[in-house]
Amino acid sequence: MYNLAHVCYGFNPGARLTGVMVEDERVWGGTEWGIGYQAAVYNGKGRPSDAVSHADGTCLSCSVSLDDKQVIADGKLVDSELKALARKFNRE
């Protein structure tokens, strides 16, 4: 269970927090973290990662920086290109 399996960034303007992970992981301005087992197709090693289970969790109002550039601050898009996208979908 100590493997980081995947991280998803929520940029779907229609996604709502429903309790169903395949939608929750897409909620605008949030992130979703998967830990534990991950199938071979995702980890790029050609074999499953070793873990007895897999769990996902959604974080809302998070802050994300990529390559020393802040992209999301407290659940709001701060990157200029993403802010334009947010305005397009009335998510700002």
Image (spheres, helix red, strand yellow):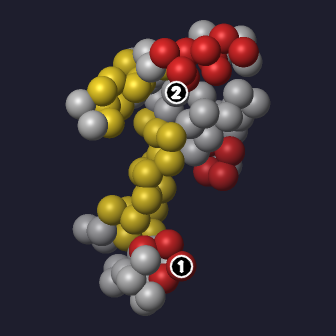
Q: Is residue 63 visible?
A: no
Q: Position of residue 35 (x, y in %)?
A: 38, 62
Rendered residue at 31%/31% (across/down): 65
Disc 1, SS:
helix
Residue 46 position (above or below residue 14)? below
Q: In terms of image quadrants, where is residue 18?
A: top right
Rendered residue at 45%/69% (across/down): 54
In the image, which disc is placed on residue 27?
Answer: none
Quarter occupied by the C terminus: top right
Q: Position of residue 9 (x, y in %)?
A: 50, 40
Q: Position of residue 33 (x, y in %)?
A: 42, 51
Query: Do the numbered discs 2 and 1 sit on residues whose CB atoms are within 8 Å?
Result: no
Quarter occupied by the N terminus: bottom left
**Image side of residue 65 versus residue 38, left or right:** left
Residue 68 position (above or below residue 83)? below
Residue 63 position (above or below residue 18)? above
What amino acid is at disc 1? Val
Rendered residue at 47%/56% (across/down): 56
Rendered residue at 67%/34% (across/down): 12
Query: Of marks 2 and 1, which one's residue comes earlier in the chain?
Result: 2
Residue for badge 2: 29
Q: Is residue 6 visible?
A: yes
Residue for badge 1: 41
Q: Nearer the viewer, residue 92 or 82?
A: 82
